[in-house]
Image: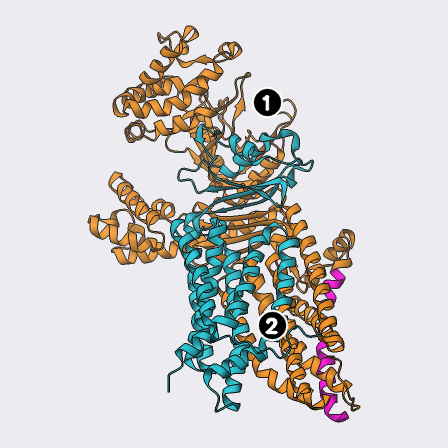
Chain colours: A orange, B cyan
Amino acid sequence: MKNSLTPRYLVILVILGWSFYSLWPSLKYQTLDEEEKELLREQGNLAQIESRIIRQGLDLKGGMYILLETDIPTLVKSLASNRNEKFDDLMEEVNKEFKSNQGKNFFNIFREKIASSGIKVVRYYHEYGSNLEDIITAIEDETEDSINRVLEILQNRIDQFGVSEPTIQKQGKYRILVELAGIQDSERARALLQSTALLEFYLVKNNASTNEIISQLDNILRKSVSEEELATLISEANLNTQSAKPNNNLENNVTTIDEIFGETTNSETDSLGLESDLLLNSPLQSLIEFVQGDMVVKSKNIYALKKLLSQDAAKLKLKSSSGQFIFSNDSESLGTSGDYFRLYYLEDSPELTGGVVEKAKANLGSLGGGSAGLPVVSLDMNSEGSKTWSRVTGANIGQRIAIVLDNKVHMAPNIREKIPGGRTQIEGFADINEAKDIAIILRAGALPAPVNIIEERTVGPSLGADSVARGQKSILIGLVVVFIFMLIYYKAAGAIANFALIWNLVLILAVLASLGATLTLPGIAGLILTVGMCIDSNVIIFERIREELRKGKTPKSAIEAGYNRAITTIIDANLTTVIASAVLYQFGTGPIKGFATVLFWGILISMFTAVYVTRTIFYTITKKSIKTLSI
Amino acid sequence: MQIIKNSNIDFINNSKLTILLSSALILAGIFSLIINNGPKLSIDFKGGTLIAVKYTKPININDFRSKLSDINISGQKFDFSSSEIKHFGNTSSVALRIASIEEEPENFSRDIIEILKNFYPNSIPEDKTDFVLSKDKISPKVGSELSGKAVMAIIYALSLILIYISLRFEFIFAIGAIAAIAHDVIITLGIFSILGYEISLSVIAAFLTIVGYSLNDTIVIFDRIRENIKTLKRGSIVDTVNKSINESLSRTIVTSLTTLFVVLILYFFGGEVIHTFSFALIVGVLVGTYSSIFVASLIVVYMQPKS
């Protein structure tokens, strides 16, 4: 008997040793304070420890999970050359179908539409091949390439942003998953990821042509937009005009476009009725005001204005006049009348784009300049960019040039002199952090394709900490309740089961640590659930032993029979839960995966602790033949 | 100590009560599901935005709701007063669920959080980063993908289990087990629908756990039946099944109790994030225990070929 138990003790000892070995880094990490961590980081040892500890999931640590999807339609469209209206219409259709038919592959739709429209696609994609199939294959490759570049650029941005242990990985073909733990300002991180970082320099059109296009557009809009449509748009805007009306201060500060261009409406004495007429007659003019020569629009009217400008007729007109309207990047308050965005009428093709940027650095504007003390980003261009920049600035002295980032005008300074050497400065940031972030994205380069955030989950730091505290509390209470119950119900045998239970928990944690798994809140729930389920194996065994004892067997043979009979039941019963948790692991994301991992290992381990370990203990006890069994 | 001693309850011949209770529960659930147009899905499956924020003073939901009726984001007007608004954990935290918007303004979630801050500017936590407890934003596209995945997960789990039980037992046992699971999930789904609780990803995880748990219980009893069929060759199937359920009754109740303890603790102490998750588990443990004692074996008896 003595000999037959030795191998059991050995197995148990080895596993016990292994579990302490794998838990050691986690325990050690717990006791480290920030300073010691910093020291280890400098020595380069921290990463090694961190790879072997149980990591906390985003829902416990706080942080954000973002799933980005590359905007394939825009990318494919941008690859085309010699684009014309026919092509744009086709892409519009493809896009519509793609949006309404989520499951379908974009390139299949693209192929079908091209085939059915009979359009000669080679004309637009001649660089990619000479027939439809070649072109589509080449574009598909190009798309995948772009996504890999997007991945690289995002990686670069995040690295410079400074987040500990970020996760950035491709998911599927066109998606990128980003996990940032412990992030405080989720909006900042969001902007950093989503920004395309497309930097462009456009000439601003002069006042005369601006004035002309606005009245031309008003004429068109008056004709093409039905009165009701206009009225609904305006009813929203109207309300704002009303609320701003009593403010005389505003009237002094802001001159309406009509005064500047000498139109007849007398806005100072407007009644509400006249105001609505004006809105109906010249919708654009009534929404746009002028400040120091810049067009400005109340932030509340932005939506109405954008709506008007996106009317088909207006778009057509803008296209033919080779100009475009772009808003400033941020609103500013003028006088006391609320927030305004500046509006610029720009040439439709850029003089220079951001690909030429070599260095970008955020700092505070130097003294003496117009931007003294304000956050600015200083740019250095490469030689090619410098040449173009000095040519453009030289040729357009006295004109304004707009610096446009991601389709928003950051500033539109007057060109006072030719700028050689390819240096320039961007202003118009809310704070130094924003300037820093913009510098980062300009350095990392523009994304080859825009990305959209299709899933975002953010857990604030306080909720995470709360969840950890609650999880710990639940586990403790759960354990205590189950312990007491088992002690009362099964006496000494209950104590053995409790011992197995503790060991089960320790082993689960050890496995999680050695797998480098992440513990999530549902994972903690899984731990608690395992407490309930692990005890089940012992309940099954103990009930069997009791039955055998009732039949009059000796403790020793009752234990033997009880275990032997219970084992098949336990395996059959637990395997179904193992199957369920394996399926969960397959389909789940983040937190759910954490739950499935814990449940899966918890049950497997419970078969070892609740069966093997307790059996060994029972054998040890019954080595000396005892008469009664406390069960 | 023992809760049940040598019980001898006739579970099979008192089946009328079982059938009555189960069909009442199932019908009530199905009725509620029909009038509510199916289960109430969370943003995980429908897409939308869920924002939970923390104020420092208790918030009146109706007041909060009325403030949401006229929201202006860059000139675009919204009326969110019919959105779902609840307290989140305690009365000073609020969770707001907004369905996905077709023409969503840029920086929508940033702007809406600013607006929420301005509702009660004097009750904002000192550390501003504590204001937003959590923010989930899911596009309808991802939502529909996740629903597809969830359905597939349930189908996979059920078929794998069906195969496993058919291999280990007889096919009629597999039918009995699957019927019991379906019974449990439909009732839990019905109770969720009646109480107006949402089905989220974590609730699906809870459902799969219920499936595993209920099967666990069922199989312990089936195991006994299998064993007793071998040893009591002469007894009728009804007697054998009754004997088996009675023999394992003590275990079934003890295990259900311990599991129920822990899920109740999860429900009461686990916090808001896993509240519905643990609620699903509570319902699942109760219904699962009931179904493995009363429903699964009953079906096996009914399906038994009459010889």
Q: Would you say the magenta stretch is mainly helix, strand or loop?
A: helix
Question: Pointer 1: residues within 10 angstroms few (<14), some, or many (20+)?
Answer: few
Asked if disc 1 and disc 2 are in contact, CB closer than 8 Å, the reply is: no
Which quadrant of the view contains residue A616?
A: bottom right
Q: Amino acid at mark 1?
A: Gly
Q: Specify start and end residues of the magenta stretch as a single range.
A: A1-29
Q: Quadrant of residue A376?
A: top right
Residue position marked by numbered label 1 in the rendering: A370
Residue A10 visible, this angle? no
Whether labels 1 and 2 belong to a single chain: the reply is yes
- Nearest to the observer: residue A205 or residue B77: B77
Q: Position of residue A30 (x, y in %)?
A: 75, 59
* On screen, residue B75 above or below A37: above
User: Which x, y percent locates residue A456?
Assistant: 51, 48
Label 1 – label 2 distance at C-alpha: 68 Å
Q: Residues within 10 Å of mark 2 (few under 14, many from 20)?
A: many
B100 and A294: which is toward the camera: B100
Q: Nearer the viewer, residue A124 or A313?
A: A313
Given the image, what chain letter belongs to the residue carrying mark 2?
A: A
Closer-to-camera residue (A156/A500): A500
SS assignment at label 2: helix
**Residue depicted at 50% across the width and 90% down the height:** B230
- Chain containing mark 1: A
Q: Earlier in the sequence, mark 1 or mark 2?
A: 1
Name the residue located 60 percent from the left edge and 86 percent from the top edge.
Answer: A565
In the image, residue A412 sits, relative to residue B128, either above or below, namely above
Q: Give the labeled residue for mark 2.
A: A603
| Mark 1 vs mark 2: in front | 2
Q: Quadrant of residue A214?
A: top left
Identified by mark 2, the residue type is Ile
**Quadrant housing the N terminus of chain B:** bottom right
**Which part of the image, by quadrant, shows the C terminus of chain B?**
bottom left
